[in-house]
Image: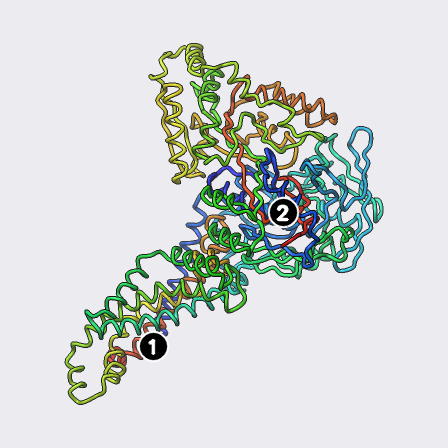
Amino acid sequence: MGRYILKRIGYMFLTLFIITTLTFFLMHSIPGDPLAHMAKKLPEQIRLNYYEKYGLDKPVIVQYGKFLKNVITKGDLGESLRYPGRSVTETILKNAKVSGRLGIQAIVIGVTIGIVLGIIAALNRNRWPDYLVMFIAILGVTVPVFIIAALLQYLFTVRFELLPTTGWGKFKHTILPTIAMCFGSIATYARYMRSNVLEVINQDYILTAQAKGVSPFNVVRKHVLRNAILPAITILGPQIAGVFTGSFVIERIFGIPGLGFYYVSSISDRDYTMIIGTTIFYATLFVFSQLVVDILYGVVDPRIRVSKSGK
Amino acid sequence: MRFKKYLSLTIVLVLILTALTGCGKKDAVNDTGSQESEGQVVEKPLDSEQYLNLVMVAEPSTLDASKGSDSYSNGILNEVLEPLTRLEEDEDLKNVLRPAGASEWTHNEDGTVWTFKIRDAKWSDGVAVRAQDYEYGIKRSLAQDTAAPYAYLLAPIKNAAEVNSGQLPLEELGVKSLDDNTLEITLESPTPYFLQLTYQRVMMPQRQDVVEKHKDKYGSEIDTLVYNGPFTITNWVHNSEIVLTKNDNYWDKDIVKLNSVNIKILNDENAIYNSLSNRSIDSSGVGKPEWIEKFKGNKDLNHIEVTNPQTFFKFFNTKDKVFSNANVRKAFALAIDREELANVIFHGINVPAYGWVSPNISIGDEEFRSVSEEPIRKLAADNPNPKALLIKGLEELGMDTDPSKLTVKMTLGSTDQWFRTYGEYVQQMYNKNLGVNFEVEFVEWPVFTSMAEKGEFQIGYMAWGAEFNDPISLLSLLKSDAGSIQTGWSNERYDELIDLASKEMDPKKRLEYFAEAEKILLYDEAVLAPTVYPKYNIFRYKYVQNLGVTPFGTAGYKYGFTQGR
């Protein structure tokens, strides 16, 4: 197991390096520059001064070398070009915290409710609870999140003035965005769980357990849930990575200072340092969460653990 | 405030931004609510709690006055720093330049040496405001290693270009403080619009000790800033909120009534409109026609319509065979029904444009557009039949005079839906009015700019806005060496007129020069075909009083207050 993890970590770094390099050269090859947001033709001297100050006058390969050196030796992702004076690393960490809080709330609630609803639906197959859950699930998957968010905002802040329309800082600010965000995961998990439970429930060992007189609750908890939850963990990985990167749409609608904004705006602003910084951040989280998921698999599914240690 | 791309989006953004920066202007003011509300509010006392909740559609890039170029940071800087002057507005909402950081100023006979008397005042940390702070601010904006995007605005100052390119040391710049209260600025040559530069961010005061302490971080967070304007910033959560609090060290603090202004940073339109509906915010620009209708019905809101100092226009490639002929260009400039365009494509929100210089730009004490007739109106009156002009032009070119055999292409720098609708609409207009085969091509903006630079187009479409409050800001864009708008056009008399106007101190003479230049541009040569001036709609609760509304104005929230909230 230890060697397996080490090997995986090695691949992780290789993957990150390739992603970073590709992104770096790709972003420099798209037309436009960080001054383009001014949408005007600046005098040549102004452009020259700006390029010189931020090292954009050098060939891309030289810029890449300098960038790599700073990242590896100092862990420094540089200064944002769109927001002069702000460190990319600090911006990412600060905003990721906000997104993280919201994301964790949403994922915990979403996964819990989703799993419970999925089990309920499966155990009541083809009866009204099943139909109701699946109806909610289809809504959650098909209705875009911005519609749900806009609807919630209108309902609870304009129609009934119960919650703040936008803003950040207090718990009440997180209620609506959390609901809007977890809607999707409720739907996804409910559907996954339902089909998994249905599959497991027809297995012989469930019948055996029931025959041995295990209580229905314990059958579900010990035998059904444990087996049915496996595929759900697979989709949990990327979702956890997404927790800290935030949701552009939700943050926009509820005025939340999260990280999602920077993923989108840095590209249109040609804020090179921010593009590469956010890319590295997301890529790291993603490959890391994949690793965690793989390890989790071993914990949840003894079959995988056995085959790994057998090697 | 220059936008060329994603016009539809831009209009919306501008609309909303205006509400925040408090800039905007009642040109053709349709402020029906205001009169009656003023009648009512006279009776009411001021609210005991003076605060405002406003909205801004984007995060200010930096509050370092030298860096950054966005209107959002401009707006905030106006509230927290004291420029030499402020462009305020009188009762009729006409812009008036008033003393601010400078209590008075004089200039020598030919207008090349200006002396500003700096007011005795204190920074928010108690340090005295000195002429040296203004000197340092200007010099830092022009220093080569600051790389300030707006440094070029300071070009009229002696040796500005040389200092900015590093050919001369900073000491050679024509800016020096004679003592703690006297700032002397020497210009390259007389510059009639120089005072319009004195309230720009690149001329705002900066404290050398503070800047040097925080270096590149200066302006990025509130703990790196000191203030000498009407307000200080007490909270700044990036991308979420800025809180301004009255500055007790401000020299004119008795006039400032608002104790705090909370500015939410929000760029989702629905969220903004929801916030306005439930009074989470007190004022906002509104872009969507259906929401404009909705808010018009709200008795608690004042509706303020404001024309932006911007022009949307088509431009012709005069190097192209067909468009090298002035009569052909005139035909194409005239064959657009601007009223219909403004109503159909822009939902009646924008104003039909018959001139190049947009409304709300002053010359001396006058508004340029109100004293100089829009040339295309005259062109239209003299040429009721654009098709005849086209045929005449084709004849002069020695081409087939049957318009139906002529194919013309317009290139648009966007591929989004709004532009597709616009393209189709213009196509129908030209088919109908000129009988030509009209093609429309859609390309991404960067592709469009490179095509324009290479002259690979016939008709293009863009928007430009004035950078500062003088017609020269727009008219100088068409000088043959400007290279801003790729028409390939040059005209000696035009260049000469712009040069004359840039040095002439007499507003009357300048008006003549500008009027003649604009006539050459649009009436004689028809190099451009302006279509609309963008307009925005502000909705503001009636208890909000005295916020600045003119587009160039920098009064901001200084005089604002609420009454009867």
**Residue at figure coordinates x 48%, y 38% from the top left:** B7
**Hey, what amino acid is under mark 1?**
Arg
Give x and y (percent) for residue A112. Answer: 35, 73
Contact between labelled residues 2 and 1, with CB atoms less than 8 Å apart: no
Question: From the viewer's perspective, is the residue at label 1 or at label 2 nearer?
Answer: 2
Q: Nearer the viewer, residue B411 or B340?
A: B340
For label 2, the SS is helix
Give x and y (percent) for residue B269. Answer: 48, 50
Answer yes or no: are tags 1 and 2 on the same subunit. Answer: no
| Residue B363 against residue A132 in the figure, above or below | above
Q: Is residue A56 visible?
A: yes
Quadrant containing the N terminus of chain B is top right
As drawn, is B121 to the left or to the right of B329?
Answer: right
Q: What residue is shown with label 1?
A: A3
| Residue A224 against residue B240 in the figure, above or below | below
Q: Is residue A69 visible?
A: no
* Number of numbered markers: 2
Instruction: State the scheme by which the image is colored.
Output: rainbow
Q: What residue is shown with label 2?
A: B74
Give x and y (percent) for residue A105. Answer: 43, 70
Give x and y (percent) for residue B69. Answer: 60, 45
Q: Marks 1/2: CA distance?
A: 57 Å
**Hey, what amino acid is under mark 2?**
Asn
Q: What is the chain identity of the residue bearing mark 2?
A: B
The residue lying furthest to the right in this view is: B179
